[in-house]
Image: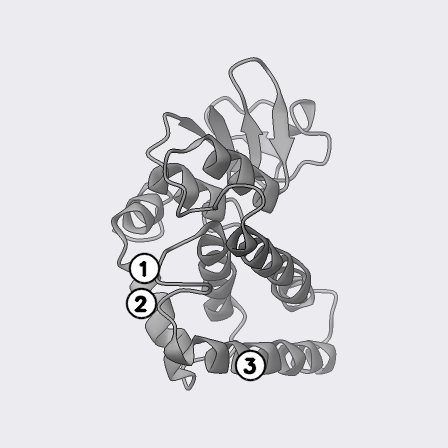
């Protein structure tokens, strides 16, 4: 498998899952500003017409897009069923519900905060709405190690990845103790540390 990624982007989540799953894979860095493959300067649109990461290229040439689906595929190929339990398990549906929540309520809520075309008033409004969701998450995490249980899952990789963006848009989350403790726990995992290091996000 080959994962096309951009450092710190949403592709970090499947990158983490590949390492948690002890999968055999390679990485291909994409410059999302120029939509070129960093190592070769080839046009990334030729591989993914959307021009977006992540993209997982399988050995037979099959391409899988959309981070949560890529993470689901990786987890389903893994012997580590804690990442995503088998189909039919209620815990699997709970994890998938969290994946959907992060996608629709958090991930996309960051978009206007990164967009220079939004004025500061609009950005403040979007930031306030997004922060309210994190205040609720802080309450959810009060008595939990991870989102659904004591086991790290694909949803935790996604929530962690998206939440790291808060520092780039000055979204104040430092006063949410349960969320901060959760982020510290996830960041301490060896697979997460390795993914962050490889992407140049930590030394």
* SS assignment at label 1: helix
Q: Would you identify the image quadrant in which residue 126 lies?
A: bottom right
Q: Residue most toward the bottom?
A: 175
The number of callouts visible is 3
Q: CA distance from mark 2 to mark 1?
A: 5 Å
Residue at mark 2: 184
Residue at 60% across, 41% down: 69
Query: Which residue is depicted at the point 59% across and 15% down?
Result: 61
Q: Earlier in the sequence, mark 3 or mark 2?
A: 3
Image: 168 above or below 95: below
Q: CA distance from mark 3 to mark 2?
A: 18 Å
- Residue 118 shows in this picture: yes
Q: Nearer the viewer, mark 1 or mark 3?
A: 3
Residue corresponding to mark 3 = 136
Q: Nearer the viewer, residue 160 or 99?
A: 99
Q: Which mark is residue 119?
A: none
Q: Looking at the image, can residue 29 be seen?
A: no
| Residues at marks 1 and 3 touching, judged by CB atoms closer than 8 Å | no
Q: Give left or right: position of 110 versus 141.
A: right
Q: Nearer the viewer, mark 3 or mark 2?
A: 3
How many neighbours does mark 3 have within 10 angstroms: few (below 14), some (14-19), or many (20 or more)?
few
Residue sitting nearer the eye, 124 or 185: 185
Q: Quadrant of residue 116?
A: bottom right
Query: Helix, strand or loop at disc 2?
Result: helix
Disc on the earlier residue, 1 or 3: 3
Is the residue under label 1 in contact with that under label 2 (CB below 8 Å)? yes
Decide which of 116, 138 is in the foreground and name it.
138
Say which quarter of the image contains residue 102: bottom right
Q: Which residue is mark 1?
A: 187
- Residue 2, how many percent across, how many down? 48, 25
The x and y percentages for residue 25 are: 40, 26
């Amino acid at each position: 498998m080959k994962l096309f990624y951009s450092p710190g982007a949403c592709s970090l989540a499947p990158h983490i899952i590949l390492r948690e799953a002890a999968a055999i894979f390679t990485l291909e860095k994409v410059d999302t500003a120029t939509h070129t493959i960093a190592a070769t300067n080839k046009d990334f649109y030729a591989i993914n017409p959307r021009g977006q990461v992540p993209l997982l290229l399988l050995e037979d040439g099959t391409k899988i897009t959309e981070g949560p689906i890529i993470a689901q595929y990786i987890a389903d190929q893994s012997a580590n069923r804690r990442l995503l339990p088998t189909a039919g398990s209620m815990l699997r549906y709970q994890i998938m519900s969290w994946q959907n929540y992060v996608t629709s309520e958090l991930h996309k809520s960051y978009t206007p905060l990164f967009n220079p075309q939004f004025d500061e008033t609009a950005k403040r409004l979007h930031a306030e709405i997004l922060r309210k969701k994190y205040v609720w998450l802080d309450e959810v995490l009060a008595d939990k190690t991870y989102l659904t249980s004591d086991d790290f899952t694909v949803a935790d990789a996604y929530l962690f990845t998206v939440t790291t963006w808060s520092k780039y848009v000055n979204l104040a989350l430092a006063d949410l103790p349960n969320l901060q403790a959760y982020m510290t726990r996830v960041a301490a995992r060896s697979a997460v540390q390795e993914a962050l290091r490889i992407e140049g996000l930590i030394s």
